[in-house]
Amino acid sequence: MVEDMLKYALEEAGRLGANYAEARYQKDVEEAIILKNGSPEITARSVDEGISVRVLIDGALGFSSTPFLTRASIREAVRSAFSMARAASRLLKDRIKLSDEEMSRARVEVKPRVRFDAVDLDAKIEFLREVDSSILEAAERRGLKVMRFLEVGRRDLEKWVINSDGADVFTRIPRTFLEYFITLYSPQHGSIQRFQHLGEARGWEAVEAWRPNEMVSEEVEHVAAVLLRGVAPPRDPVDVVLGPEIVGIICHESAGHPGEADRVLGRELAQGGDSYIKPELLGTRIGSDVVTVVDDPITPYSFGYSPYDDEGIKGRERKLIENGILRELLHNRETAAIFGVSSNGAARSAGYDLEPIIRMSTTYMKPGDYSFDELLEDIREGVYIKSYQEWNIDDKRWNQRYVGVEAYRIVGGELREPVRNPVLEVTTRSLYSSIDAVGKDLKFFAGYCGKGDPIQSIPVWMGGPHVRLREVRLGSTPPKTDW
């Protein structure tokens, strides 16, 4: 039935005289179970399903959608998109062109070992309670009060894209996630917060593989040590080692977002901001030669797994920064035509009723040759910042700031006492240029990336290895004293 409706949409668009037509079926199933301070807060499930149509008429695009899978509603959606494009074509000075591409015909289905909905709801709640108990026990061992927020859920996607250029791509991707937010409190030392978001394109087996009981217990122990014994960061410039979690958010915010071609063209100014990257800067140096940042939609198990985009283009690794050089932007077919390149399959939509726009998938720094001990061994005085509790970046993605949670002094190549609230505040070029060594490890973290108007939130992965920065001046923030 769905295939028939999609083909019918293309036939109607062709009959009206569209130069190009695209029809997409999308079904998103979301489920969430939340536990707050040991009590079930909410259990929710939603299904969002429908078909969208996009047409190109005389250099203008029109978009429309419908939740009703009937020929009458499809016909109305096609006419609405056609009408919008026709009206826009009378006003446009610069006509939209789509790059010539090899269209994909593919079927991709990620099959979970354990379906999320195959696990009983009571079992999921009991699972969260066991994780919650691990947090409580670890906090009590330290004599601390603790507030807890836990969430486990899924975001399953089914999508079918066909277009008049020959694309025919079906994908079915299950996604499972686990999120926790912990606040520890001591009357004498104030409070400290820690959050984490894990997610993969798998089923319930991903949750089991994360071993959350051990993970949260260890997390509370380490963060509690920072709260109770943390010292201020050094005031003089020191060498800094950053953990994969911080490297991941850095790559996402200061390489991925500014590398979106629509942002480079100024089209996100009113929503997501500007970019420090201008077309003439491609091919110029932004960092040291050990820095390579990529966005790869075909990374296995990625929370942002997107092997084919919503324009029927096969995904591939995109090298945003290669050996310190700004190398490539994220493109859809429209921006690819403007820049005179091929699309690299970056068009994604968050729902059937939203137009595909340029998005990231899995953005990370490529690993190097150093072990963690080798990164530390020749540091006389430094700080290791493993995780963060806060980040900020300006609208051009140039000035950025990260506040660490779990952090330690490095003295003579060894980790010493915890450091509380170290602040890394640098420009993008200074940060990437300060990196002189990259670890051989690689770790990923899940997140939701917001962009567009209306806002589109999509699942992504970000990560990297440990990295070492030379001669960086750290700041600090005052400890939080409120509960």
Image (cartoon, helix red, strand yellow):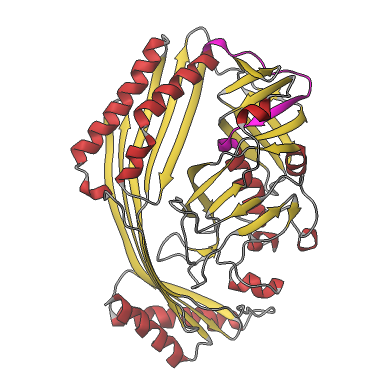
Magenta region includes residue 30: no
Indicate the position of residue 310 as horizontal and vertical percent values: 48, 69
Q: Is residue 367 visible?
A: yes
Residue at image position (52%, 51%) is: 450
Residue 178 versus residue 294: which sits nearer the camera? Answer: 294
Quadrant in which the N terminus is drawn: bottom left
Q: Is residue 483 visible?
A: no
Indicate the position of residue 117 as horizontal and vertical percent values: 24, 49
Residue 15 vs 158, above or below: the answer is: below
Q: Is residue 358 left or right of residue 28?
A: right
Magenta region includes residue 238: yes
Q: Is residue 396 left or right of residue 388?
A: right
Residue 460 vs 423, above or below: the answer is: below
Q: Residue furthest top?
A: 188
Asked which quadrant contains residue 440, the reply is top right
Residue 1 vs 48, above or below: the answer is: below
Asked which quadrant contains residue 260, the reply is bottom right
Indicate the position of residue 42 as horizontal and vertical percent values: 28, 38
Residue at image position (29%, 25%) is: 38
Residue at image position (60%, 70%) is: 343
Residue at image position (63%, 73%) is: 342
Indicate the position of residue 41 as horizontal and vertical percent values: 29, 34
Q: Is residue 248 left or right of residue 144?
A: right
Residue 183 versus residue 161: which sits nearer the camera? Answer: 161
> Which region shows up in magenta?
228-246
Total number of numbered discs in the rendering: 0
